[in-house]
Image: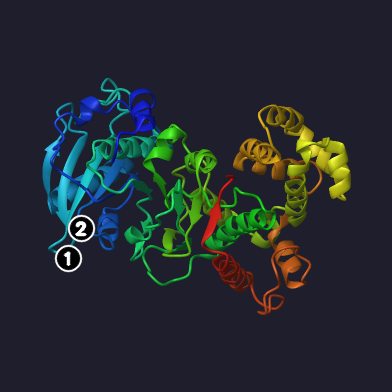
Amino acid sequence: MTRNTVIEKYLAKYAEHLASSLAGFPHNRMFERCVVIPVYDESPAFIERMQAPAPPNTLFITVLNCPQSCTEEQRLSTQQSRQYLRDQGHVMWTSQRHDALQLIQTQAKEKAQHRYYWLVWDITEWCIDAALDPIAHHTPLPGFLHGVGYARKLGMDTALQLLYQQQISDPFLLSTDADAILPEGYFDAINSPSPLAGYIFPFQHRPLSTEFANGSVESQIYELSLRYYVMGLRWANCPWAFHTIGSTFAIHGHHYAANRGFPKREAGEDFYLLNKVAKTGSLLCLQSPTISLSDRASHRVPFGTGPAIERLTRMEDKAGEFMFYHPTCFVWLQEWMSCISALFSDDLTTTLETRSDNAEELTIILNLIGIQKAINHSRKQSKSATDFVRHMLTWFDAFRTLKFIHTARDHFLPSVTLGDWINSIYSGAHPFVPSTSEALHTSSLASKTSTLLTHIRTLEHKNLPYTCSIK
């Protein structure tokens, strides 16, 4: 790619320090595309799953990582992936600094003529204290952190460095997880000539062991909650209406650098990065192909899919215990979104009283999240109503949208149970989820959940592709 000062600045000031680790990397090795995969306590079976739909000359950057709390069994399980790659292929290059970084060439079992490349970071030993563990096989690597956010950042920073060196052709860097099943067409889906900041792939949950099976009732309930939230945002005309799942998106290298990369968080790193990227460019939510995600319970991260499914599994009365945001939260959000443009010239109280039947409640919610300061700042920075709206939406981003929903929930609109949420759809009382023709009143919870998930997936699919932008 041509010289990019934004990427140069990021690599110099904000990226992980990779110069010494990548010293001596073969400069004549060129790759068509790159996908970054953090790996913790995964079976090496994911390697064949990743290679199956991949065109030749694909680079997989894999970061084998362990949290400080992991067991020795989990550490060894994570390390098996590098050994499997070395057994199946051959090591082309090893970092001169340490053996934690290697380039390994492999070939798919069913496509012997296709060559793939795995640039493997093994930072599983980072937290070993030699004084406490004298039998450790490696010297601990200073400077490395635990958590999926750091693993994604290390992998993506490595990809960005190679992109900057013109060793990766496609500027869109793919992000996924080892427990994802990448579909045919995954690597060919990113082909839009228009300038975009990133792409978001559609997804569904299902067991990894059975290709065509539906997911568990727990994963279906959790997926319903994810889709319901995004569906509510789109209905409310909110520009942040996209899924934020780390295994389902691609980001242009320029926008990744402009937003200082993945935050080093133990969870939620995908949400915070996409929240920033959507402010500097457009995100395109694709209609296909669909990535399949594991529906297993997990404690790998503090929150997210695995912990949510684990929590659902422990619930004896899922219909009465699992909670959904009150639908009216999104009604109020829609009312607020319709008011923003008028605030360029009108005061908040007058605008809300004119445009909303819930002016008093909205005033309290918005003041609690600091709206007046944002209005004043946006007016000062704007020469037109269009500029004002852009500044306001930059402030009222995905994070503050979620904060708006939570504040409405905490003060006025308590969440509803799964059972009540289902009944509101069946009765036709839901404001933006139309009733399904399938009977919901006589079936089991598992059947109701499956029916509604199919229904909402279909509704969402009809609105794809969907572009999220504030420009």
Q: Residues within 10 Å of mark 1 (few under 14, many from 20)?
A: few
* Nearer to me, 373 or 366: 373
Looking at the rendered image, the quarter that the C terminus falls into is: top right
Give the number of the mark in front: 1 or 2. 2
Rendered position, 242 above or below 279: below
Of callouts 1 and 2, the N-terminal one: 2
> With 171 as the anchor, is 112 left or right in this view?
left
Q: Which residue is mark 2?
A: 56
Which quadrant of the rendered structure holds the N terminus?
top left
The picture quadrant where one finds residue 427 is bottom right
134 relative to 282 in the view: left or right = left
Instruction: Identify which amino acid the numbered label 1 is placed on.
Output: Lys
User: Is residue 423 among the parts visible in the rendering?
Assistant: yes
- Locate residue 215 relative to residue 381 in the image: left or right: left
In this rendering, is residue 218 above or below 135? Answer: below
x and y percent of residue 11 in the render?
A: 33, 28
Q: Are marks 1 and 2 in contact (CB under 8 Å)?
A: yes
**Residue 143 at x, y percent in the picture:** 33, 23
**Extreme-front residue of the structure:** 383
**Image height of 163 relative to 357, above or below:** above
Classify residue 440 as left or right of residue 214. right
> In this orientation, which residue lies closer to the viewer: 206 or 203?
203
Question: Residue sitting at 35 percent across and 52 percent down?
Answer: 178
| Element carrying mark 1 | loop
Residue bearing mark 1:
111
Is residue 65 something that shows in the picture?
Answer: no
Q: Residue furthest top?
A: 131
Residue nearer the viewer, 382 or 360: 382
Amino acid carrying label 2: it is Pro
Residue 365 versus residue 174 in the image, above or below? above
